[in-house]
Amino acid sequence: MTAMANRISVWLEAQAAEAGAADNTQLAYARDLKDFAGWLAARNLDFDSVGRDGIERYLVHCTDQGLALSTRARRLSSIKGLFRFGYEEGWRDDNPAIRIKGPGRQKRLPKTLEVEEVDRLICAAARTGRTEADRIRNACLAELLYATGMRVSELVSLPVAAARGDPRMLLIRGKGGRERMVPLSAPARTALSAWLATRAEAEDPRAPSRFLFPSRGKAGHLTRHRFFTLIKEIALAAGLDPAKVTPHTLRHAFATHLLAGGADLMAIQALLGHADVSTTEVYTHVLDHRLRELVLDHHPLARDG
């Protein structure tokens, strides 16, 4: 292992232990810093020798590659974290990244769905699948996702123990290992009960899975990638534009519909598992935007002529 790779490995371990960074975040940091290390090595630079100008040239390189603004912002965040840690650990007597400003982030409103579109999606989920068991599982996935606003990674990795006994609440382990309780709607409980019964019939008692949605793959459960493609298939069956529908779209719909129904922003923050309420506040902008569209489309004084 090179000295640069060793520095990165130590920082990633510290992030996991101290900051409680989620696995997906860790993987993103690792990919970012691997690319940075490769760029440095091609120019005979490394962690100890690169200066501020070198880091800025790398960021220009990222821009020239056409990387999304959000990707470039995350790469700089990874680099800043590594050099801040290195300075604190005494690996360097300066921090060349400390004064570098990021590209900022574009403020884009999250895509969401109308209530009627969600209804169509959930109905289509119950019709999508090669077998009856697949259709029951797909209906459960869609109901749980919309009823709880879970992240897709939280949904597919749910332990079956959390769902037994007709629960009124689900215990969800989110980012950084933070836990939260989310109530289940009556339709979600019905779908969950049907899936548990079907799952029990198909399971091999000699090799029981600990996951609610087991799979024969390496992870042992349905993967995020498979569910992403599955939700596209369900969208097609529902007559919706697949480009408009992702697992995260249902999370956004959950929050937006709650807010439109009068739910408190702090309650939505707790249900979504956001560490900071400022992250949740984007849904107020979504609601404002949709209300403006409603007025412009339907108010008689807003119509042309």
Image (cartoon, rainbow, N blue to C red):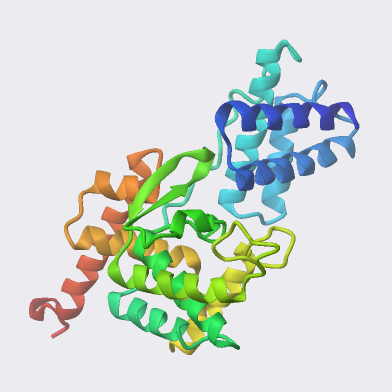
Quarter of the image where the N terminus is located: top right
Say whether residue 281 is visible. no
Q: Kindly give the residue lying farthest to the left in the view shown.
A: 301
Residue 234 placement (x, y as % from top left):
50, 82
Query: Which residue is depicted at the point 45% across and 84% down?
Result: 126
Residue 183 vertical placement versus 51 (above, below)? below
Residue 274 or residue 67, whichever sits in front: 274
Q: Within the image, what quadrant is residue 20 found in?
A: top right
Residue 185 vertical placement versus 138 (above, below)? above
Residue 264 vertical placement versus 247 (above, below)? above
Residue 2 placement (x, y as % from top left):
90, 30
Residue 140 placement (x, y as % from top left):
45, 72
Query: Which residue is depicted at the point 82% across and 41% down?
Result: 39
Say whether residue 290 is visible. yes
Query: Which residue is depicted at the point 69% across and 32% down?
Result: 12
* Circle count: 0
Q: Within the image, what quadrant is residue 145 found in?
A: bottom left
Quarter of the image where the C terminus is located: bottom left
Residue 161 placement (x, y as % from top left):
50, 54
- Left or right: 50 in relation to 282: right
Query: Which residue is depicted at the point 35% across and 52% down?
Result: 182
